[in-house]
Image (cartoon, rainbow, N blue to C red):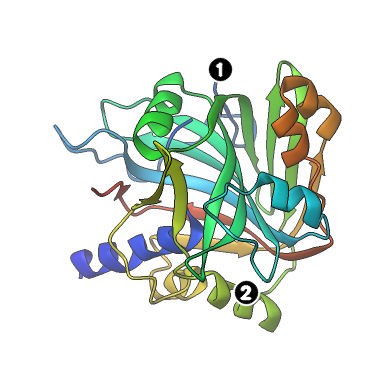
Amino acid sequence: MKTLRHVLLTSLLVALIFTTTGCAQKSLKNNERAKPSNANTVENEPRYTYHEFDMLCLFYRTNDIATYKKLLPKQFQMPEEPLVMVFFADYYDMDNATDPYLETAVLLKVNYKDKPAWHCVTMPVTSDEARLGGIHYLGYPKIMGDISFQRNTDQFKGTLNLNNKPIMSVTHNTKDHFVTQEEKQMFERLKGLPNLNILNGQVFKVKFGKGSGQYSLLQLSKMYPDALEVKVGKSNLVMDSNAAGEYSKPLGDIFSIRPSKMMLAYYLKNKTVMRFEN
């Protein structure tokens, strides 16, 4: 059963496009560092093995088609639905040889060979080692950033600062919120989408876990509640494109893409071991 659980749960990362990588770390749980509930580690296990982590994820449509198109590499085509994914992640329980770190990212839905996928356009992290590895081995557009992740019983918040200036924040409230039919449908629509980067000028598919994407994240959380917790709710997204533009013009464009409609937002706690596959 443990093997089956691992295989099924790793499929959620195919759907969510979990990534790897990540200045000073700030990870707060009621103003304290998050504590892994299962700190069992294995000697000599592969680097960047993820034992437990938390995430904030939100998905939104945008009407800023011009900027969206400008950010797409030539290898990709504009999707029928311009959909943006933003996430914050706190990888606080890693293998013995890898320091915990945080990251955040903005991804755009794209078409590649007439099929939908995700493409990451920026990924700030708090670990320079994770930044370099993500760039050179996985093709992620990683930069260093100052990232925090705050937790309370029913409210969560992720923040990103660059050059000591606030760039982006997501506040997520789960109080008295139950999964709607529209949210269930959105979880279904998101499952199985691959994550495609550009590595050495070529399209590169990131493989994190061995799942097939058969189940949605919401389904998996119902099947294995001891290993996976999902809390849907309402999220508020704040972005400062002017401050981002002072860092670089592309970042100014990325953080200028505003929502026209929020589609889905949730907090995730994952307690199943994950790692990248060759």
Label count reads 2
> In the image, which disc is placed on residue 24?
1
> In the image, which disc is placed on residue 142?
none
State the residue in front, 99 or 156.
99
In-image side of 277 versus 159 (left or right): left
Query: Residue placed at 30% from the left, 46% from the top?
Result: 276
Between circles 2 and 1, the one closer to the viewer is 2
Quadrant for the N terminus in the image: bottom left
Q: Name the spot of residue 99 as percent of width and height, x first.
A: 37, 25
Q: Name the spot of residue 161 as percent of width and height, x first.
A: 71, 25
Q: Quadrant of residue 162?
A: top right
The reply to whether residue 47 is in sight is yes
Disc 2 target residue? 186
Which amino acid type is shown beneath numbered disc 2? Met
- Mark found first going from the N terminus, 2 or 1: 1
Query: Residue placed at 26% from the left, 25% from the top?
Result: 97
